[in-house]
Amino acid sequence: MKPDTSIPLDWIRLELIPLPNYVSQFDPMILWWNPETGILEGEIAVVTDIVNAAIEQGSISIIPSGSMEITQPLHKASELAAILGQYFWVIPEPVKRPFELSNELDSSNRIGLLN
């Protein structure tokens, strides 16, 4: 058996589609996220605000009942999914690097948040 020589996919492309009750507030968007480094890339202003508000609050309510502590959503998939899932359908896709589908890599769009 040959050893696995494939390159790990460190980034996740997140397609965000607003839930029906948020269509008037948010546009569909695509982001790239590296959970190991806690970096989001792309048009991230809206998501940055949502994530930072959840961090400040310290927890979010989840349906049907209960709450989830928010400590490091840019490093923990469950926390980021819980935050984004309140506003968007989230379609994740592992990729090698940000902007992979458009063949662009512009480091000026790189932002690390609070982590």
Image: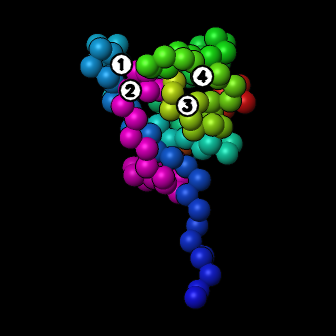
Question: How far apart in space, not on screen, are marks 2 and 4 (Cα)?
Answer: 18 Å
Pointer 2: what residue?
88
Question: How far apart in space, not on screen, are marks 3 and 1 (Cα)?
Answer: 17 Å
Quarter of the image where the C terminus is located? top right
Name the mark nearer the viewer: 4 or 1: 4
Name the mark nearer the viewer: 1 or 2: 2
Question: How far apart in space, not on screen, are marks 3 and 4 (Cα)?
Answer: 11 Å
Q: Residue at x 58, y 88 (%)?
A: 1
Residue 62 magenta-highlighted: no
Left/right of residue 56 with respect to residue 81 in the rendered view: right
**Reading the chain from its start, which is encountered first: label 1 or label 2?**
1
Question: What amino acid type should be assigned to the residue bearing mark 4?
Answer: Met
Pointer 3: what residue?
80
Q: How crowded is mark 2: few (under 14 residues within 10 Å), some or many (20 or more)?
A: many
Q: Quadrant of residue 86?
A: top left
Pointer 4: what residue?
68
Name the mark nearer the viewer: 2 or 4: 4
Q: Residues within 10 Å of mark 4 (few under 14, many from 20)?
A: some
Check whether the beta carbons of the residues at disc 2 and disc 4 lie within 8 A of each other: no
* Magenta segment: 84-104
Q: Residue at x 60, y 22 (%)?
A: 68
Q: Which residue is drawn at 47% across and 26% down?
A: 84
